[in-house]
Each structure stands twice: as C-alpha cells, then as structure tokens.
Amino acid sequence: MTQSQLETKPMMTEEFARHLASGLKMDTSEIYTQVLNLRDRIWDYVSAELAFTEDLGCADIHQFNDLTGNPLGKMRTFTGKGNNPVDWVIHSNIGLPENTFTNIHLTFWMKDNTDIPHLGLAFGTLPEAFYYADLMPRYELVTHPNYVEKYYAAVNQMALDHQKALYQDGVKPFHAAMPFIRSSISPCAICGVGPLAFFQQHAQEQIMAMVKYWVGLVKQASPDSSAEACAERRQRDYQQRKNIVYLDPANPIAERLVGKEAADRLVRILAGEERNGEPYSQI
C-alpha cells in the first residue's frame, strides 16, 4: 500500500489544531527538557543492555534545520547487532520548545524472527507534557488471547493504576482524534497529556518499568524457526509500521516546518524505507 492509497489522512486533536490555528506561541522549554531527559535516559539504558549498530543512511540529517535555516531537529537510526532481534530503531526529535510544539521519538521495531511486541515511545509538548509508551502487538489481540496473556498480563496492573491516577487527578487521557490512531494503541499503554507534575509523579517511572520489562523479554528471546510464522509477521509488521508512520498526526506540522520534500523523507526514514541496510519491505 502506498501513501496515496490510504483512505484517511493524518488528523490532530481538536484542541491542538485550534492552538496552532491561533498562532499562539508558548515557551514549553521546561516540559521539553523533562520529557527529553526521560527519552535519553531510556536510550542510555536500552543501548547499555542490548547491542546496536548505527545505520548511517540518514547521517546527513543527524541535525536538520527548518525552512529559514534555524536548527529544528535530530534524526538517528539503529539496527540490532548480533543476536539482538531489533530491526529498526528511531531516535529523533523535531520542533522548538520556544514555539510550543515538539515531538520526540524512540521506537524499536522488532525483526520477524520473534513475536515480542515492538516498543513505541513518544514524548512532546502539546503544549502540556505528552507521553506515550506501548508494547505494540504483532497480532490482532482479540483473536490471540494467549498472546495477550503472554505479554500484557505482566503490565496490566500498572496500566490500570495509571488510568486511575489520570481519573483521580483530573488529567485528560490521550485520546487521538483519528480512530486509526486509537485502534493502534494496546490496552496496556501508558499515555496522556497533562501537567509536568503529573508526568513526573505518575508516568515517567511507570514508562521506565515498561521499558525494563520489554528489555527483559528481548534478552530472553528465542528465534522462531517457523518460516511461515516469520513471513506472516514480516508482512504485518511492514503494514503496521508504514500505516502508523504515514498517518502520524504530526506529519502536517513537520511539512509546515521543513517543507514537503524533507518531511516526506523523514517519514520514509521512520518507516525504515530509507536506510543503508536492506529495507524491511513487504513480501
């Protein structure tokens, strides 16, 4: 499926769309520093536990500018090294906190030789602290209850506790405008948009706990020898990754900041379609 064949378009939440339309700029540097710090702390932990090789296909945009030439973001990509079953890692950020919007990614897409969930992490300023951490499933969960039990039971209570904290503190849960985006989030995701104090008290350590749980799964992974199962996962992974990346509600903002050509390239890199190593393409 190409981007032009997608029947829906990226759509941001009503509140943030209204904020952008107003032209109002807020300095979100304090929040940005804290959420970026968590992203970097997670990367330091994961890269110390698992081996990676940097893919230099995007070396020319390790740092990139906006249309006026001002520094705007960073992009780095990695692949699993040796027996590490991680296929593609996105380590990126875009936006200037002085102008409200920022979007920070750290995503780990798995190879097809394991059924361990992908790990998706995103942070930013919308303009409050935005955070998302999820074990992205490799199968349709409602038809694979054993898979749910295998990987999600261990983090279920933490997800329930987080939902309870959101309710008790009157913080708005993350509720994407697009039904597609909502459908992509597992039942045990830790995500929300709220005050920095709530993020610090009820989200950052829970997210780190989820990351440590996922790293434990990866370190204990045994390769799947079934060629049929691997092929099925590979096809689904490709479609899942491409759809999520091409329909990201932040894409129109990126296009506004860096232009369509550069924004399209960033999307291709996020999807793993532009890299030095062999592209992870549909079979």
Image (cartoon, rainbow, N blue to C red):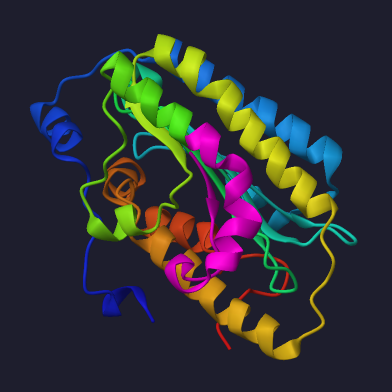
Where does residue 240 sit, x and y in percent of width and height? Answer: 47, 68
Q: Quadrant of the C terminus?
A: bottom right
User: Is 35 left or right of 51, judged from the image as shown?
Assistant: left
* Residue 157 lies in the magenta-colored region: yes
In the displayed structure, 194 sits above or below 108; it is above
Residue at the spot 21% in from the left edge and 67% down from the top edge: 8
Asked if one can make out residue 109 in the rendered structure from this viewpoint, the answer is: yes
User: Start and end of the magenta stretch?
Assistant: 133-159
Magenta span: chief secondary structure: helix
Q: Residue at x 34, y 73 (%)?
A: 3
Compared across the picture, whether 112 is left or right of 36 comes to right
Relative placement, left or right, of 7 versus 95 is left
At x 72%, y 55%, the residue is: 56
Which residue is found at the position 64% from the left and 29% from the top?
Answer: 208
The answer to which quarter of the image holds residue 258 is top left
Q: Position of residue 83 (x, y in %)?
A: 88, 62
Question: Percent x, y for residue 19?
Answer: 15, 28
